[in-house]
Image (spheres, rainbow, N blue to C red):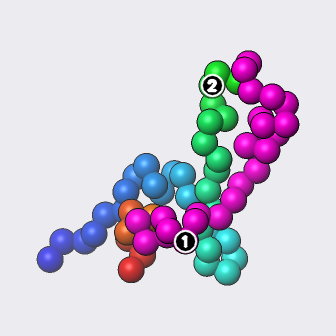
């Protein structure tokens, strides 16, 4: 049986914490920034953890079963 490949897009978008949780960046911070408030843009800079409801999907993309 062939090796299972990691999804290339997911590999670039997610990182792991020291305890094994998966970090992600916020969306909506790449363009059309003129209509967003300073507070909104500032809050989009930070990283956050992947939500529990999406965790299985992300783990499958990263080939972590």
Label 1 – label 2 distance at C-alpha: 28 Å
Inspect this view and state whether residue 29 appears. Answer: yes
Specify the quadrant that holds the C terminus.
bottom left
Is disc 1 placed on a helix, strand or loop?
Answer: helix
x, y (%) of residue 3?
Answer: 25, 71
> Which mark identifies residue 62?
none
Inspect this view and state whether residue 62 appears. Answer: no
Q: Mark 1, mark 2: which one is toward the viewer?
A: 1
Q: Which residue is mark 2?
A: 31
| Residue at the far right in the pictured view | 39
x, y (%) of residue 37?
Answer: 81, 28
> Above or below — where is 16 with respect to 36?
below
Magenta segment: 34-57
Which residue is found at the position 41% from the left and 65% from the top?
A: 57
Which residue is found at the position 63% from the left and 31% from the top?
A: 30
> Above or below — where is 59 with respect to 27?
below
Specify the quadrant that holds the N terminus.
bottom left
1 and 2 marks in contact (CB < 8 Å): no
Q: Which residue is mark 1?
A: 52
x, y (%) of residue 41?
Answer: 77, 35
Q: Is residue 38 left or right of residue 53?
A: right
Q: Nearer the viewer, residue 1 or 35?
A: 35
Q: Is residue 59 left or right of residue 4?
A: right
Which residue is found at the position 79% from the left and 44% from the top?
A: 43
Is residue 56 covered in magenta?
yes
Q: Is residue 1 left or right of residue 35?
A: left
Is disc 2 placed on a helix, strand or loop?
Answer: loop
Of the image marks 1 and 2, the number of the one nearer the N terminus: 2
| Residue at the far left in the pictured view | 1
Q: Quadrant of residue 36?
A: top right
């Amino acid at each position: 049986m062939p090796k299972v490949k990691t999804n290339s897009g997911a590999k670039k978008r997610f990182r792991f914490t020291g305890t094994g949780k998966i970090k992600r960046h916020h969306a909506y911070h790449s363009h059309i920034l003129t209509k967003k408030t300073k507070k909104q843009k500032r809050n989009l800079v930070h990283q956050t953890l992947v939500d529990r409801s999406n965790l299985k999907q992300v783990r499958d993309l990263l080939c972590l079963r």
